[in-house]
Structures are given as C-alpha cells and as structure tokens.
Image: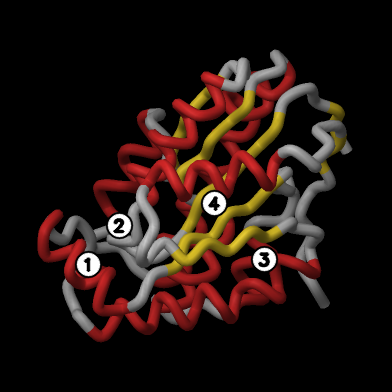
Amino acid sequence: MSTRGGMLITLDGPGGVGKSTAIAATQRALTADGRTVHTATQPSAAPFGQAVRAVAQSMRGRALALAVAADRLHQLETEVRPALAAGRTVLLDRYLPSTLVLQRADGVPVEDLLAMNAGVDVPDLSVILFARADTVLRRLAHRGTRHRFETDPANAQREIDLYREAIPHLERLGYRILTVDATDLTPKEVAGTIVSALSSLPATVVNPTTPTR
C-alpha cells in the first residue's frame, strides 16, 4: 500500500460518450473549487504510450493487452503517483475499466486482464459514462471515428454491455463506481455529478489491484 495526498479519478466509457468534454468540464469545476488538477490519458503521453496508441490499430489480443498494462504501470510510477503525492487531483482518461472492455472485445479473458494489471492502484472514484447506443453513434458520426473499435456500428451497444459486465469485477477489487447516463446531460452537468460524488470520499490510501480467483 502507498499513502498519498491527492485523489485519483478515472473516467471511462464507450467511444463517443463524451469523456473528453466531461474531463475538461470536471477540471474547470475542480479548479474553481480550489483543487490543483493534473489531467492525463491512457495510453500515456510518454513515448511508449504513444507507441502503444499507434500500434493499437493493428495489434490485437494479448500482445496489445500486455502493452497497455505495461504503459499503465509505468505511468502510475512516473506520473500519477508523484502527482498524487504532491496533493494534486488526477483526472485520468481511461483506466482498467476500458481494458476490461476493449481488450476483452479483442478476445482476452477477464481473468488474464486482471492478472496483467495486478498492482495497479485503485482510484478514489471510477466514473463510467454511459449513453444510449444511438446517441453514441450520432456523436461518433459528428466527431469522426478514431479507432478500429468505433468503425462497426454494432460495437456501440457491445461496448455499453461490456462496461456493465465489468462493474462487478471492479467492485470486487474495491473500486468505488459512479455510473453517469450522459445521454441528455451537458458536460457541465456531468462534471457537477462527479464533483458532488467526490465530496464524501477520503483521499488517503491506495490498495493495489489484485486479480480475482
């Protein structure tokens, strides 16, 4: 276990659900509340993380899952934990919930994914954004697809279903899950929901994630 001073908030959800705008709005709300906020994304902005992002269009299965996990562990050590130790609130775009969806969609069993990610920190709050599949598809059409997971319209509902299936696994690891239906919410309203949920959370100890048996 490692003691820290800040809070780790992760945001996950299907492509096109509005994570980026929600994170930007949440950063503004937390800053206005007097917090020092550090934003980050997975894969990370480090050279290895950018390499993972580049090969994710062609690499699949266990190889990609291992690369994503390695980048996550490195980012925790070099970026996230130092920011938390400095008392910052870290907003992280994608974390273990996305792995349990995207890499599972690539055919890697949940048990293997949890084993690959053994030792990753449990966030203070894990936010999973949802929206109706038709809303996600409309937003993707407006934004443009950016990843192979977003090219098949059927994947929108599949991702939504896999995120719901991932929640019990995460809760067994000690994750505090906040689900937000962003179908009819503005980014500011999503941010307000997140900030409200944070008010009752302590920021003291990280328990490393361990795989279920």
In this figure, which residue is indicated by the disc labeled 1?
148
Against 98, residue 119 (above or below) is above
User: CB atoms at circles 2 and 4 under 8 Å apart?
Assistant: no
Report how many numbered discs are placed on residues in the image.
4
Q: Residue at x 27, y 53 (%)?
A: 55
In x, y percent, where is residue 149? 27, 70
The numbered mark, 1 or 4, whose residue comes first in the sequence reads 4
Depth check, mark 3 against mark 4: the one in front is 4
The numbered mark, 3 or 2, whose residue comes first in the sequence reads 2
User: CB atoms at circles 1 and 2 under 8 Å apart?
Assistant: yes
- The kind of residue on which mark 4 rests is Tyr
Q: Quadrant of residue 37?
A: top right
In this figure, which residue is indicated by the disc labeled 2?
56
The numbered mark, 3 or 4, whose residue comes first in the sequence reads 4
In x, y percent, where is residue 191? 49, 42
Quadrant of image for the C terminus: bottom right
